[in-house]
Image: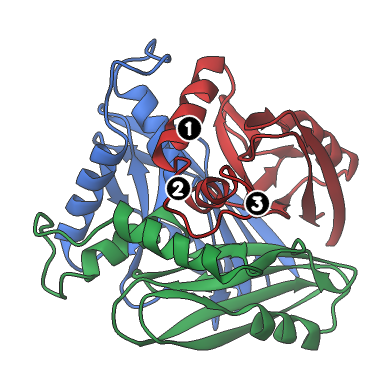
Chain colours: A green, B red, C blue
Amino acid sequence: MRQAAHVLEVATPGAGLVEITRAVATWVADQGMATGLLTLFCRHTSASLLIQENADPDVARDIEDYFAALAPESAAYRHQDEGPDDMPAHLRAALTQVQLSIPVIAGRLALGTWQGVHLFEHRARPHRRQIAMHLVGE
Amino acid sequence: MRQAAHVLEVATPGAGLVEITRAVATWVADQGMATGLLTLFCRHTSASLLIQENADPDVARDIEDYFAALAPESAAYRHQDEGPDDMPAHLRAALTQVQLSIPVIAGRLALGTWQGVHLFEHRARPHRRQIAMHLVGE
Amino acid sequence: MRQAAHVLEVATPGAGLVEITRAVATWVADQGMATGLLTLFCRHTSASLLIQENADPDVARDIEDYFAALAPESAAYRHQDEGPDDMPAHLRAALTQVQLSIPVIAGRLALGTWQGVHLFEHRARPHRRQIAMHLVGE
């Protein structure tokens, strides 16, 4: 057995879902493992990772609207120093997750037919985000 | 060190929690590892995985009611093609998670006394679901 | 490749976030691995794990208030036997997660600059909590 690690950089255009399935799958394929475990770790507290349907773009829009309403901008937060979109960004990250692990079976990520891996940017402005990737297997 | 992988199929009777602890623990025991890491990955976008109390069935009922209210059926969603229960199913999956990793210590899953592993079906009708399982250890 | 496992005990003073980054990082450093994967697993159904900003303590207070409001104490829950704070504790655990995996790269946890690992106690009274830790790498 062996392992590999890499940091993926993703540019986001502002709040919303950015699909990263292809970049992730390409790196995994390059490691040439038949069986293994991929772990993705988002190195930020105001962005997160989400696996969701990538067939109908309306799903992503509905998800974005839902989390914007569930953790809204509000004057009631104590933490306001980094702007009104910062504290809701932390909350939306807490409600989703910063880490995902996906088995590799028969040389491929075991994603379901409709599953796409997304970086969920929660800040209003564009950012450069880092996702640490780790693969163990053979 | 070595690894094993398997796809577990679970039939769900419609929306709600289905405990899968026994099926998962049996497969892990069959691999005969003293120490390791088990990863479960739900290959769907409208079902998820949840570890929760399995002693009092009222806990599961309260959880089901809570998520039904937190991500309700609504005419306001853009994505309606697959029925009124589909978009809330995606949201409930996003609020929980599609992946769980559990250490194996002293030959057993390191679950706490009251922890049971559940598949959380979010669609109204029965489905057959696939959970990819990966185990690494020795 | 090799692996290590350990159960970390954490005393909580009641509901709220308890940072455990130092205890976790110290154990990982003691294993002397350059590359690997750390998994933390909370062995409880009324406490969870959360990576969040540890620079401004207001962020933790806002997160605690937010989850207290999102899953409030209520007479409407069926499950009341263990006190009014028990069912909301299960819900807050379900909304966050009981497991986190973090890659180890260049001998260090791949946490971002502002990321701290926290145990999120959801019960009102102090508890002793167990976090199973597993590390695989070399």
Q: Give the vertical position of A79 relative to C105 (above or below).
A: above
Judge the density around disc 2: few (<14), some (14-19), many (≥20) Cα neighbours within 10 Å.
few
Residue B54, image x and y in percent?
59, 22
Look at the image and tell me whether residue C25 can be seen.
Answer: no
Q: Give the vertical position of B105 relative to B39 (above or below).
A: above
Query: Label 2 lies in what chain?
Result: B
Judge the density around disc 1: few (<14), some (14-19), many (≥20) Cα neighbours within 10 Å.
many
Image quadrant holding the C terminus of chain A, namely bottom right
Query: Label 1 lies in what chain?
Result: C
Query: Label 3 lies in what chain?
Result: B
Q: Which residue is mark 2?
A: B75
Question: Is circle 2 on the same chain as circle 1?
Answer: no
Q: Is residue B83 left or right of residue A28?
A: left
Q: Give the vertical position of C47 relative to B101 (above or below).
A: above
Q: Amino acid at mark 1?
A: Thr
For the residues labelled 3 and 1, say whether their Cβ atoms are less than 8 Å apart.
no
Residue at x 29%, y 18% (from the top left corner):
C84
Q: Which residue is mark 1?
A: C45
Q: Amino acid at mark 3?
A: Glu
Residue C61, image x and y in percent?
18, 51
Q: Quadrant of residue B134?
A: bottom right
Q: Is residue A91 left or right of residue A138?
A: left
Image quadrant holding the N terminus of chain A, namely bottom right
Question: Is circle 3 on the same chain as circle 1?
Answer: no
Disc 2 secondary structure class: loop
For marks 3 and 1, give the CA distance.
33 Å
Q: How many dots with numbers?
A: 3
Residue A38, image x and y in percent?
69, 70
Judge the density around disc 3: few (<14), some (14-19), many (≥20) Cα neighbours within 10 Å.
few
Q: Which residue is mark 3?
A: B82
